Image: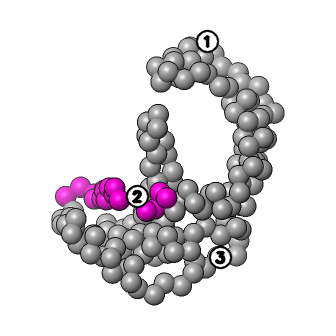
Amino acid sequence: EGSSLVVRKSDIGKTTQALGLFADVMPDGHAAALTVLLREQERMRRYGLSDVDIAAVKQDIRDVAQRMAGKEEQREFADWVQQIATVWAQDKPYTGSQQRGRQALMLLDSIDNQQVNALFQRWLSLPDRLVQFSVPGLTPFTLPTVQAVLRQEQQLKKAPLAAPERSVD
């Protein structure tokens, strides 16, 4: 009730990536949300991503890439300087959004569902974890111990879990 789960992948350096599972919860729902996140992580580990879900994400990417490829970039001079300075500081060449859109469209069809699931499973199987809580103001909250989180993960590995259900949009 009143909460949501989100999965995001981010680059956090030149060669490092992170897969994040996030829950938006009511102030007293942190412990329950952690259980839900760990359970859904285990469900994703067991069942992977469905072909339907992968196709939907690929279509969303295709839609954005087509818009990017069809639109010339227009910026003020200061915005161009900021854009170029940022990639220069990262020691990367500048690639405009129109070019990135074209590249995405060329690569999109070469990505198959098995590759996506293999990479997703690799991310889920990595041992490093970060469990972070945001608690409003002076709300009392006791953090779970590392051992408690690991114990819950181990219990969920043995628990029966049904395949994910798809909601009909």
Asked if the stretch drawn in magenta spans residue 134, the answer is yes
Picture residue at 74% right of the left edge, 30% below the top: 98
Q: Is residue 84 above or below residue 24?
A: above
Reading the image, the residue beneath label 3 is 167
**Quarter assignment of residue 22:** bottom left
Residue 18: x %, y % from top left: 44, 49
Looking at numbered disc 3 in the image, what kind of residue is underneath it? Ser
* Crowd band around label 2 with a 10 angstrom C-alpha radius: few (<14), some (14–19), many (20+): few
How many angstroms separate mark 3 from mark 2 (CA)? 29 Å
Residue type at tag 1 = Phe
Work out which residue is located at the far top of the displayed protein and give it. Answer: 77
| Residue sitting nearer the eye, 1 or 169 | 169
Please name the residue shown 81% across and 33% down the image.
Answer: 70
Q: Which residue is disc 1 drawn over?
A: 77
Are the two marked residues, 1 and 3, in contact with CB atoms closer than 8 angstroms? Answer: no
Compute the Cα span from label 1 to label 3: 46 Å
Q: In this rendering, does residue 22 appear at all? A: no
In the drawing, does residue 110 fall left or right of residue 36?
A: right
**On the image, numbered disc 2 is attached to which residue?**
126
